[in-house]
Amino acid sequence: MAVSNSQNFNRILHVDGDSFFASCEIALNPKLQGRAVWVGGGRRGDGIVIAANRAAKKFGVTTGMACFEAARLCPRGVLCPPHYHEYRELSDRMFRVLEQYSPTLVPTSIDEGFLDFTTMDRNVWRHTTAANYVKEICERIWREVKIPVSAGLANSSRLAKLATDAAKPGFLEISPGAEKEFLKDRSVRELSGLGKNRQRSLAALGAVTFGHVARLPSILLKQKFGIWGQQLWLFANGRWSEPLLLQVKDRTTISSNTTLPYDEPDYPAALTFTLSEATRLTGQLRREQLQLRELALAVRFNDFSEVSGGHRFAHPQFQNSIVNGVLENLFHEIMGAQARPVRQIRIAFWNLTRLDTQPTLWGRTNAERWGALDEATHHLNEQWGKPTVMTGAQLSLQHLDGIHKNPKAKCPFVPQREMVKKLWGTNADPLAHKGDSEKRLAKVSKQIQFNH
């Protein structure tokens, strides 16, 4: 039974798409409903398992397993190659539903996010309950998006995520005052972001569960781990309550890891692909108003050996001509003594800094003009659903091999800044429209009451 919370309690809901990639495949092909399904990576979708639904997991299919091993464990299961573009679209539809149920929505990945329910009992839940409200959210996502979701409600985002994990599939509310009891027998390894070094350090203190942590002296944890140790002690004792904040941070790195459609013995062709991919990444950075200071290039061969190299610029860079010039020299440097076909190319840009400019059509600076060009190119390509405006390297790549005319979408793990901008058209906190949100929520809650 839900306990009515007062203004002293934060109430945070965590929502997570169940086996999201596999669920997306079933949503795209309803004939797969009820069957064991897993999504495979690699060139032909037959590399490793990157997602498996519950039916497949019952046979022992797990993420990271080779697809041939999954087929051995579950002969009647279905292997699906990934369709990342469609996953992004389904994710967007899911978040469009979620944003209607709380004044604050914080997306954290393609398939999960947090909603602030702190004032719901005063503004919305006079007509319903927390359980019914969340049930309506989950049912609506299923009706409109065909994606099953699980959810957890607690006094902090960390605890809400643990509640979701415990609830799957379904919903679990940890009522105010019940936090310590819920945590006492759970392993500290379940805490998101807890590294192995800290796990080992806690185990050395005899703390394997949160109950063990709660019984340790708080001063000991402070001496061992600093402020994080104090927060952990408060969390384990059910006394850590935090508000939900939408903090949009700049990314610190951007990278591309691409396995070529086939092993490429032609190094000039591999270089053309490298420069084309670097152009895409550089344009992405400029759209986010960022520039890079360091880059790295790694090339893996068909025998899985690899060579790599890096470069640090004297000043941050944002232009294709400069970045690609360095990458081309780096490619020749690391490939000079090689003779094996290329299987995979990895590019990474990091040590990113702000590009202090707003893209305008008639920008007064070089950076502004580049930003305006990137923005226009991005809109044209999105409008036509394919690369319409290309650099010379990108056009050359298509002429080399027709397979690049419609390149596969990249894995859809986009930074939070982009997710927020796509949802609300701005990087700003949507709390600017909190009054409108609360009116809409009140209307939704009345509709739920009518339905029930």
Image (tube, rainbow, N blue to C red):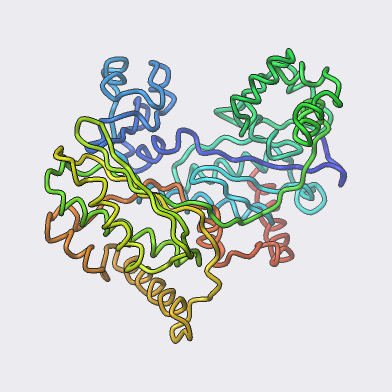
Task: From this view, report whether residue 173 is shown above or below residue 264.
Answer: above
Whole-percent x and y of residue 98? Answer: 58, 50
Query: Which of 30 and 172 lies nearest the eye of the viewer?
Result: 172
Query: Is residue 445 or residue 335 the one in the foreground?
Result: 335
Q: Which residue shows up at 26% across the image and 35% down it?
A: 45
Q: Percent x, y for residue 231?
A: 78, 34
The image quarter in which residue 15 lies: top right
Q: Is residue 297 visible?
A: yes
- Give the percent coordinates (x, y) of residue 448: 66, 48
Q: Residue at x 48, y 51 (%)?
A: 253
User: Is residue 182 found left or right of 425 in the rendered image?
Assistant: right
Write down the quadrant of residue 361 in the picture: bottom left
Pick the residue in front: 24 or 114: 114
Q: Is residue 1 visible?
A: no
Quarter location, residue 153: top right
294 over 368 or under it: above or below: above
Residue 401 horizontal side relative to residue 34, left or right: left
Q: Residue furthest top?
A: 206
